[in-house]
Image (spheres, rainbow, N blue to C red):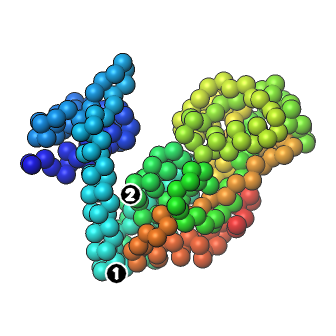
Amino acid sequence: MKFTLRQLKVFSSVARWSSFTRAAEELFLSQPAVSIQVKQLEEHIGLPLFEQIGKKIHLTQAGKEVQHYSHAAFQQFREMEEVLEAMKGLSGGRLDIAVASTINYFAPRLLAVFSRRYPDIDLTLEVTNHETLMQRLEANEKDIVLMGQPLQKLDLEVVPFMENPLVVIAPPGHPLAEERRIPLERLAEETFLMRESGSGTRLATERFLQEKNIRLRTGMEISRNAAIKQAVRDGMGLAIVSVHTIELEMETGRLLVLDVEGFPIPRKWFIVHRRGKRLSPAARAFRDFVLDENLPELLGTGPYSVKA
Ligand code: PGA
């Protein structure tokens, strides 16, 4: 058969998302480019791999077989890469990491210090939300992931490395700004801007509110921390975010943290990889760096950022 690895990669992405559009986004391709690759693969194989039922696409029986074998093949390739990386040692090593969008507020500083210490390691960084990070871990696509507590039951090695408290933010001059020990129930009278449903911040917030039996009024769902902060500043509502996202705004007084009973919601950041994964020397160096350094001091992060 004459199909290419690239066609298999595109096919796997469409199969994973059950969507040509999302695969195109993930692979930074246009949707027609994705469709062409899948069509060519189908022509080589001589069988349809997807079928459309209603608005959704589904794998055919042949598609399921191709998915099964390409998954195994990509696992093997990654293992080959890991073995070769290990042979290279630190110099010339590569490190492919992914971080939660909320961590992006300090990840560049962290990587800058690491890079100065290990200038020979080539770094690749992906920034995305909790749900996508779980998919990356499941597919064993990253050396290391920095994220909030993984909830799904994958076989993972999960070690905390820093505090990640969630706080209620408001614009300056908000009627609750001067109040102390605001009762939790009082929040039900406000409108809240929420992250998208695949966000770890959103999941943790929902769990906390459910435990306390509080229902919040949601004004808008916004998938970026930066856009949430802007909307809060513009008076569209309050929000619950990680303190790491608001360092700058706290310093400049553009946003403030409300003193609400039960807050901050305690969370931690975790360094995560598949259990049993063969960490390359570069990945081990990064893991030791994250776990051994006093990161709040190194990063100069705010008063909430005490070491786990
Ligand atoms: P997120 O990150 O809200 O950007 O998904 C936090 C997490 O992983 O919990």
Residue on which disc 1 sits: 89
Q: Earlier in the sequence, mark 1 or mark 2?
A: 1
Q: Is residue 151 left or right of residue 280?
A: right
Q: Residue at x 49, y 50 (%)?
A: 134
The picture quadrant where one finds residue 90 is: bottom left
* Image quadrant containing the C terminus: bottom right
Q: Residue at x 84, y 46 (%)?
A: 262
Residue lying furthest left: 2
Residue on which disc 2 sits: 141
Q: Nearer the viewer, residue 159 or 50?
A: 50
Circles 1 and 2 in contact, beta carbons < 8 Å: no
Can you see residue 187? yes
223 is higher (above) or lower (below) than 121: above
Q: Residue at x 52, y 56 (%)?
A: 154
Q: Residue at x 49, y 67 (%)?
A: 275
Q: Crowding at label 1, few (<14), some or many (≥20) Cα neighbours within 10 Å?
A: some
The picture quadrant where one finds residue 143 is: bottom left
Q: Secondary structure at mark 1?
A: loop
Query: The disc labelled 1 sits on which kind of residue?
Result: Gly
Residue lying furthest top: 54
